[in-house]
Amino acid sequence: MPGPHERIIFALDVDSSTRAFEWASLLQGEVGMLKVGLELFVGEGPSVVHGLRQRGARVFLDLKLHDIPNTVRQSAQQAARLGAELLTVHASGGAAMVAAAVEGATQGAREVRLPAPVVLAVTILTSISDAELDAVGMRGPCEDAVLRLGKLAVNAGAQGLVCSPREVKQLRSEIGKAPLLVVPGIRPAASDTHDQARAETPAKAIADGASLLVIGRPIREAANPVARTREISAEIERALRG
Ligand code: C5P
């Protein structure tokens, strides 16, 4: 089992490689992984992933792939060649697409002799309401769709899911112990909730069955980001001891 600080994924929601590398240096050894999202990847490209890896960071490539299976297979293959260790796809792309992502990730990793990235599926974005789900023609309510898509993705070979703190407990009970549950929307007690309407504390998310926590602003906006990260690690450690 990873140490408490390795359960923290820092969200690199910044717009340049320069800033990303500054955070990588500051948080080296303090968090388990750094998350590169669409903004940074579209702006800076694969070189940001190479640069982070050269600085010793482990990278979560959060691109939420959603396309025909062949395209997703080849994109996952490229992500694996870059050395990403976690990769996201949309479960709503269907079982064949999720399976293709896993195949591509495995193939790409073999080519560069690295461990295959773990493919995580995103179910229903937390920005989607029941009314919006209905408007796009998907069967709701959202909480049912999350379970349906989560099970579909895991059965198709996804090794984990991204889910909100509210969904962790039920998903964990439905999909068992093995799949990773990676959870954003985390706010340490007594911190600003920002736009995360349904935030939870690190302790609660871990107690409910979260594997890894994605944390951005609570660390980025802290007066002392390293001290804040260590407080979060201590909170995770207490929750793990139960
Ligand atoms: O700053 P904050 O801790 O809210 O950052 C959370 C990270 O997780 C951001 O990169 C955000 O895009 C991502 N995320 C989220 N809520 C979701 C899915 C992803 O906040 N439901």
Image: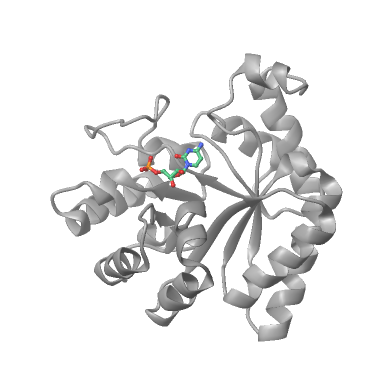
Residue sitting farthest toward the left: 223
Could you tell me which residue is drawn at 15 percent across and 54 percent down? 224
Q: Could you tell whether 169 is left or right of 30 in the image?
A: right
Tell me where residue 77 appears, x and y as whole percent.
71, 70
Residue sitting farthest toward the front: 43
Tell me where residue 183 appears, x and y as whole percent.
49, 43
Where is 145 relative to 134, above or below?
below
> Quadrant of the rendered structure where residue 26 is?
bottom left
Where is 38 relative to 194, above or below?
below
Residue nearest the viewer, comparing 213 with 123: 123
Could you tell me which residue is drawn at 58 percent across and 75 percent down? 82
> Quadrant of the rendered structure where residue 114 is?
bottom right
Residue sitting farthest toward the top: 131
Where is 70 relative to 191, above or below?
below
Q: Could you tell whether 128 is left or right of 33 in the image?
A: right
Q: Could you tell whether 48 is left or right of 68 in the image?
A: left
Residue nearest the viewer, comparing 105 with 199: 105
Query: Quadrant of the image for the C terminus?
Result: top left
Residue nearest the viewer, comparing 7 with 112: 112
Tell me where residue 13 appears, x and y as whole percent.
38, 52
Tell me where residue 55 appears, x and y as whole percent.
37, 79
| Quadrant where ligand 1 appears | top left
Q: Is residue 3 visible?
A: yes
